[in-house]
Image: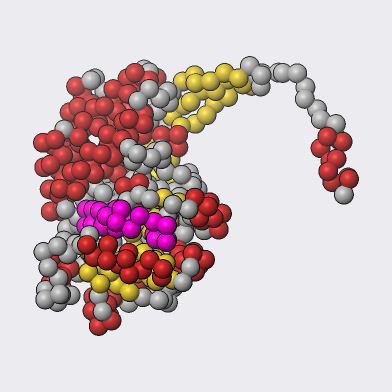
């Protein structure tokens, strides 16, 4: 009986979303859709809303810290709105007289977005804005931890939508408490799935029978070579590793340093708040953070003070300690330390040369994080090109703080996003940052043009000559 009630609730929600979407598209225009995006963005970006909701998110999930979440919510939403400003995502967009083609953009329909507890505000808002930009409606399925604060955000979003005469049913969420049963039903009923979170969630999305945009697991490896500006590299790694207590999938999980500059690089990292652990301390960290290969809650996205206390490092750490560095030589499926951590420490590798650095990075990402991204601190441009051709990665982030840069930032050209596609290497259907272009159907008018039939010699000349 309870299960049937849960399913009927989802059926009702999707039915309301479908009606709201039909009206939104039928009576819509790009100007109206852009106004809807502004209404949603301001619901989170309004400073007093952002601060209160960020604090609530930390209280509810126990992950991250409110100050950084406030900054993340602001920057990610502002950057997305910058990307979308002036972009036409609905209706007639291009004509190509030479090919006789005219292109129109239409919405997918009703979107379902599965979102993680690590970003219970920024990720839903990003998905909502991308959906509304092109005339869709959307239903959010949050993690059980994070559902309460999302409900508070949706109350504000609904008020803002109603102020501009739009149906609040354009933006809904799975009723609290969320459950696998409810989410499964939602995935079966909608027109498109966007899945951000655990590999299990992504696999469930792909197997639901509904077209799905899943993104892969992060486990970022960053290489520091002998040409790097070591002080800048250390500062950027420190800022990235510690931001929001390392909740980002784009936070460095392993740092590989060439032996030639290891001592100087280590000194720079220590000056930026790094504490190098000895073997006993490293063993204690591993046994605390992982149990039977699975991450425990003890150090997960916690403040550094909590991590230091849980690992009995009070005598070694001091007020400047921001993150931990764990030396290791092992990488791959038998070395749990080389996996994703979501905590303020990283595995530290020393290698003889750049070839060994690449080989180590590949071992790490073949274990976890394939397709996501690799960081490189170097002023040898050839090495970035080399990584792009040999690593199973969709992004090579050069001389940047990785957790900010991977999802797009104000000083690089990637689209602002909180969901990074990992291509076939990460078993994903997309290889770029999730953005509005994934939320539209392209319609083409096709006209007769002059025939263009090649001669066989033009096509096969090189082969015949051989």
One can see residue 5 in this view: no
Is residue 91 depicted above or below 291 in this figure? above
Image side of residue 97 versus residue 51, left or right: right
Is 335 rendered above or below residue 31?
A: below
Q: Position of residue 35 (x, y in %)?
A: 28, 22
- In this rendered view, identify the residue nearer to me: 151 or 316: 316
Q: Residue at x 22, y 59 (%)?
A: 272
Which residue is at the front of the view, 231 or 159? 231
Q: Quarter-wise, where is residue 455 in the image?
A: top right
Q: Residue drawn at (15%, 75%), measured in percent from left and top?
A: 316
Residue 407: percent from left, percent from top? 36, 45
Residue 243 is covered by the magenta coloring: yes
Please tell me how many numbered marks the rendered image carries: 0
Residue at figure coordinates x 17%, y 64% from the top left: 321
Residue 222 appears in the picture as rendered: yes
Magenta segment range?
Answer: 222-246
């Amino acid at each position: 009986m309870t299960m049937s009630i849960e399913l009927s609730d989802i059926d009702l929600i999707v039915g309301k979303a479908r009606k709201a979407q039909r009206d939104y598209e039928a009576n819509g225009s790009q100007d109206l859709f852009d106004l809807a995006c502004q209404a949603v963005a301001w619901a989170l970006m309004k400073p007093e809303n952002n601060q209160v909701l960020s604090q609530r998110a930390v209280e509810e999930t126990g992950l991250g810290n409110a100050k950084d979440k406030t900054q993340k919510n602001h920057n990610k939403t502002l950057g997305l709105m910058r990307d979308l400003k002036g972009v036409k995502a609905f209706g007639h967009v291009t004509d190509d007289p030479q090919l006789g083609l005219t292109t129109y953009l239409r919405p997918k329909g009703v979107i379902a977005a599965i979102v993680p507890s690590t970003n219970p505000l920024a990720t839903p808002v990003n998905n909502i804005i991308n959906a509304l930009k092109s005339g869709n409606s959307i239903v959010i399925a949050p993690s059980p931890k994070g559902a309460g604060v999302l409900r508070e955000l949706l109350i504000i979003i609904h008020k803002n939508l109603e102020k501009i005469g739009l149906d609040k049913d354009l933006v809904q969420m799975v009723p609290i408490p969320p459950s696998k049963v409810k989410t499964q039903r939602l995935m079966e009923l909608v027109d498109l799935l966007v899945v951000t979170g655990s590999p299990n969630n992504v696999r469930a999305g792909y197997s639901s029978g509904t077209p799905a945009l899943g993104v892969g697991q992060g486990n970022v490896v960053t290489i520091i070579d002998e040409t790097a500006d070591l002080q800048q590299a250390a500062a950027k790694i420190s800022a990235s590793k510690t931001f929001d207590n390392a909740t980002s999938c784009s936070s460095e999980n392993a740092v590989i340093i060439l032996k030639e500059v290891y001592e100087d690089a280590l000194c720079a990292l220590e000056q930026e708040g790094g504490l190098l652990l000895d073997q006993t301390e490293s063993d204690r960290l591993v046994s605390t953070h992982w149990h039977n290969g699975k991450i425990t809650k003890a150090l997960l996205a916690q403040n550094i003070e909590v991590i230091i206390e849980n690992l009995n490092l009070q005598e070694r750490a001091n007020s400047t300690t921001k993150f931990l560095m764990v030396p290791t030589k092992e990488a791959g499926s038998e070395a749990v330390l080389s996996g994703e951590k979501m905590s303020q420490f990283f595995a530290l590798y020393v290698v003889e040369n750049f070839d060994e650095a690449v080989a180590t990075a590949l071992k790490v990402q073949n274990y976890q994080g394939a397709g996501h991204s690799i960081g490189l601190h170097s002023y040898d441009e050839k090495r970035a090109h080399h990584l792009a051709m040999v690593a199973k990665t969709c992004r090579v982030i050069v001389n940047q703080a990785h957790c900010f840069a991977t999802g797009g930032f104000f000083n690089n050209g990637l689209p602002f996003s909180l969901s990074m596609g990992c291509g076939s290497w990460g078993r994903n259907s997309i290889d770029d940052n999730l953005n509005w272009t994934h939320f539209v159907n392209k319609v083409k008018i096709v006209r007769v043009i002059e025939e263009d039939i090649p001669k066989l010699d033009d096509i096969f000349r090189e082969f015949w000559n051989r």
